[in-house]
Amino acid sequence: MSDTPLNRALAQADANLQGSLDRFFDLLRIPSISTDPAYKPQCLAAAEWLVEELSGLGFEASIRPTPGQPMVVAHQIMPTGPHVLFYGHYDVQPVDPLSEWEADPFSPRMVPAPNGDTHIVARGASDDKGQLLTFVEACRAWRAANGGLPMSVSFLLEGEEEAGSKNLGPFLDATQEELRADIVLVCDTDMWDATTPSIALMLRGLCGVEVEIEAASRDLHSGVYGGPSRNPLQVLTTMLAAMRGEDGRVLLDGFYDDVDELPEAIREQWARLPFDGESFLADVGLSVPAGEAGRSIQEQTWSRPTFEINGITGGYSGVGFKTVIPAKASAKVSFRLVGRQDPDKIVQAFRAHVAAHLPGDCKAKVTVHSASRPTIVSSDNPYLEPALAALSEEWQTEAARGANGGSIPVINEFKNRLGMDALLVGFARVDNRVHSPNEKYDLSSFSKGIRSWVRILAALSD
Amino acid sequence: MSDTPLNRALAQADANLQGSLDRFFDLLRIPSISTDPAYKPQCLAAAEWLVEELSGLGFEASIRPTPGQPMVVAHQIMPTGPHVLFYGHYDVQPVDPLSEWEADPFSPRMVPAPNGDTHIVARGASDDKGQLLTFVEACRAWRAANGGLPMSVSFLLEGEEEAGSKNLGPFLDATQEELRADIVLVCDTDMWDATTPSIALMLRGLCGVEVEIEAASRDLHSGVYGGPSRNPLQVLTTMLAAMRGEDGRVLLDGFYDDVDELPEAIREQWARLPFDGESFLADVGLSVPAGEAGRSIQEQTWSRPTFEINGITGGYSGVGFKTVIPAKASAKVSFRLVGRQDPDKIVQAFRAHVAAHLPGDCKAKVTVHSASRPTIVSSDNPYLEPALAALSEEWQTEAARGANGGSIPVINEFKNRLGMDALLVGFARVDNRVHSPNEKYDLSSFSKGIRSWVRILAALSD
C-alpha cells in the first residue's frame, strides 16, 4: 500500500480501534435520556465528555447552554480544503420496558453475533453515539497519522434530537455566522443492507402529538355509573380507530394532498438494488405488510406517510382487574410525513378529527411534541459523488442512493436557516433495535464506519 | 320511649357510636387490597382483626384458608328466632391513581360535608368495611343491651370480592351444611337517595376480561418500521371501537338475546320514587347520557347491559414522546349483564369478536378475570316486608324496592349452591366514590345503618 495520507490514516484507525472502543463505551455509560427531565445532569455530563474529547483533538470546543439540553460546538480551522460541519446528537431514547433488556442499558457489552460480527449492546449504541463517534475517531486517526486535519471541521452535537430538537432552530439562527460551512455531514442513518453502504437522499418528516380526553370529574365505578356515563377510553379508541381505513390509508382530511409519487428514477434504482421485504418483516416476527394496500414494503417504509399510535394510557393497568371508568385517557400518536406534507397542516387536520369525534361531555387537549417536514436531499451538490465513491471503495460494492423512514428534522433547519446542504452517511443496520430494548451497533459498522469517514475526508479534500 | 329490647339496643347503639367509629377506623387502616398479590399479608391481617372482634362478641369465629385470600366464618346459635347468615367482604380495591387522593387512602379521616353530614374518607370506607361493620355493631349493641342476640347469627366475610370471588363457590360447596341458614343478609348496596332507604331486588352481572394483542417480536422504531409493520395498539383500538355503535348499543353478536324489558310493575314503582338523573350525572361532571339511545338514565344504570373499557396499556406512557411501535398492547374490558344474560356466552362472543378483528400477523390472548350472572332477588321471601318496614320506620319514609348497577356475584352462589335467598340492605350513597380516589362513607350511613340493622334484627325475630 502506498504511503499516502489516506493510507496512513486508515492504518492508524485500524491500529487504534481498541482505544476508539474504550471511548465509545465511556460515552455509552452516560444515561443521557433527553425526554425525561430527571436525566438533565446526565445529558450535561455527555456534553462535557464530548467537549473534553474534542479539545484533546485540537478543537476549540465548548458547551453552549439552551433552554433545554446544551449544545456542543467545536471548530478546527485549517488552511486548505472545504469547511465541513458535522452534526450528531448525544442524547438517547428512554429505556422502557426495562424488563426486556438482557442487561443494564447503560452497561455496554460486546455480544458475539450469529453472522460472525460482534454487537455492541447499549442504549444509544447505534442512535447516535456509535455513529457520531465514527466521525470523531476518523478525525483522530487522520490527525495522528498526518499531523493535522485535511480540511476545516466544525461540530454541532445536540442533546434534544430524541425530544423534538425544540431549541435547535433558535440556536442555528443565533449562531449562523459561526456555524455556516460548505456542507453538513450527518451520521444517523442506515446502510442499505449489511454489506452495501448508502447515502440517504430522502427522509420522512415527523409529527408527534398527544391527545388527552377528559370526561367525568373523577374516576367512576362501572357498576354505579356504567351506562349513562361517558368513558374517555371508549371515546379515544373510537377516535383513533377512525384514523385509518382497512386498506391501511390514513383517513385524515387532505392527508394525501401533498404526497407525491416516488420519482421514476428512484423507483428504478431501488428496484435494482437487493431488498428482501419478506426478510425485513420476518426479522421482527411479521409476515403481512400492514401499510397501504398496493404499495411495496419499501415504499410503505420510505416513501409513504403513516399514522401510528405510540402509546395509550388510561384506566387500570395493574395486576388483576378494576371495574373503573377513568376520568381521563390519553394517547401519544405520530405521523411520518413525505413529499410536501406540512406538519402544521397535519396537526390542524388531526385537531379537527379529534373535535369531530368528541362527545358533548368531553374535553380534549392536543399537545404537539414534535413537528418536522420531510427531507429531500439535493442530488446535485458537489460532495455527493466523491462521498459515494469513497464509500464504494471502502465496502467494495456500489454505494446506494438510499432513503430512510425515520426523521432527522435538523437537516431542514440547516437548509432553511443556514442555506446548507447535507450528506447523510450512516453505518447503522435495520436490525439495530433503535428505540427498543437491547439496542446494538455492529462492531463492523463502527470500525468500517471510521475507515469510511477517513476515506470521505480524503475524497472531499482532493 | 318504652323499655323494649329494641329501644334498649337503639339507645346502646347511639351511646356507643364513638367506640364503633374507633373500630371502623382500625379496620380502614389495614390496606387489604385483594387484587394485588403484594398485599396478601394485609388481607390476612384484616381477616384476623375481624375474627378477634367477632370472638369478643361471643361468636365462635375462625379464619378459613382458601387458595386465595382467607374467609372469616363465625357462628352464634341462639335458642329462638330464625337463623341469618351475614355476608360481607373485607377486601378493598387498589388505590391508584394515588396522586389524586387528598390524603393517604389508609389513614381514615373525618371531613365535614357541605350538607352538614360528615364524610369518613378512606379506601374501603363504603365498599365494604363501613357497611359490614354496621351489622357487626348492631349485633354488639343488641347483645350489650339485652344480654344476647335475638336470633342465631352466622358470618361469612370474604377477602376476594374485588378480585372476582374465585374461591367462594368451592368454599360454599365445601361448607354448605355449616353455612346454610334461613336467609342471607348483605350490606353492600346503595340507598335510593340520601334520605330514602332501599332494598335492592336487581343487580347486574359482571364479566371482566383482559385481551392482549401481540404483533412484532420486539418494540419497533416507527421511522424504521412504520408503514408495513402491524401496530397492536392500532389493532386493539379498531377492535374495541367496533364493540359499540353510535347509539350506545353493544355490537357483539347475540348480546341482547337474553336481555328482558323491565317489568311494568318495577318501571311504575321507579317512576314514582324521586330520581334526578341530571343531578346524578352532574355530580360527576357529566350532562349527556352516554348509554343506549332511548333509555332513561335509570334504565341505563340499573336494567341495561354495558360494555366498558377499564384500562389500556401499550407503548410509551412516560414523560415526553417515544416514536415506538410496541410489540404488544392490552386492554381490560368488562360487561355489566342483566336479565338472563350468561357471562360464558358473552365471553364466547367476545372471543369471536377478537378473532374476527385479528390481522394475520397477530396473536391474541383473552383472559377471564370474573364472570357472574345478573341477580334477581325473589320478592316473595317472608323477610322482605318486615325488613322494608323496619327501614321505613328508622328513616321515616317509605323504603324503596331498588336496584343496583353493580354486581355482587355471591348472591347467585348462595341461591344456586345453598338454596338461600338474600336481602340486600345497604346504606351507601351514590356519591361515595367507590373504587375511586377519596372514597367515603357518610357518618349518617354508619350511625343510622347500625340503628337500621338493630330494627331489622327486631323485626325478623318477631
Image: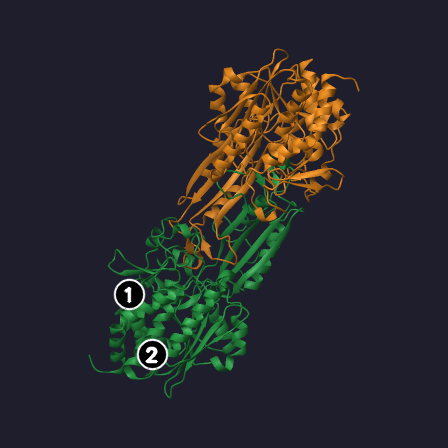
Chain colours: A green, B orange
Q: Is residue A152 above or below residue A401?
A: below
| Outermost right residue | B1
User: What residue lies at 43% left-to-right and 39% top-to-bottom?
Assistant: B365
Chain that bears disc 2: A
Q: Residues within 10 Å of mark 2 (few under 14, many from 20)?
A: many
Circle 2 — which element? helix
In the rendered image, residue B161, in percent from the top left (x then y), is placed at 54, 31
Quarter in which the C terminus of chain B is drawn: top right
Residue A260 x %, y %: 48, 63
Q: Chain of mark 1?
A: A
Amino acid type at circle 1 is: Ser
State the SS at label 1: helix
Q: Residue at x 34, y 75 (%)?
A: A387
Kindly identify the amino acid type of the residue bearing the numbered disc 2: Leu
- Above or below: residue A162 compared with residue B180: below
Q: Which residue is mark 2?
A: A457
The residues tagged by marks 2 and 1 sit, at their Cα atoms, a distance apart of: 19 Å
Location of residue A363 in the rendering, given as x and y in whole percent from the top left corner:
65, 51
Does A228 appear above or below B86?
below
Q: Say whether residue A252 is left or right of residue A100.
A: right
Residue located beneath label 1 in the image:
A444
Please identify the quadrant where the N terminus of chain B is shown.
Answer: top right
Contact check, label 2 and label 1, Cβ < 8 Å: no
Residue A102 appears in the figure: yes
B224 up-or-down from A153: above or below: above
Q: Residues within 10 Å of mark 1 (few under 14, many from 20)?
A: some
Tell me if A363 is positioned left or right of A74 in this view. right
Q: Decide if residue B56 is on the left or right side of residue A318.
A: right
Where does the image place residue B169, in percent across and percent down from the top left?
Answer: 49, 24
Q: Residue A233 bears which disc, if any? A: none
Q: Quadrant of residue B201?
A: top right
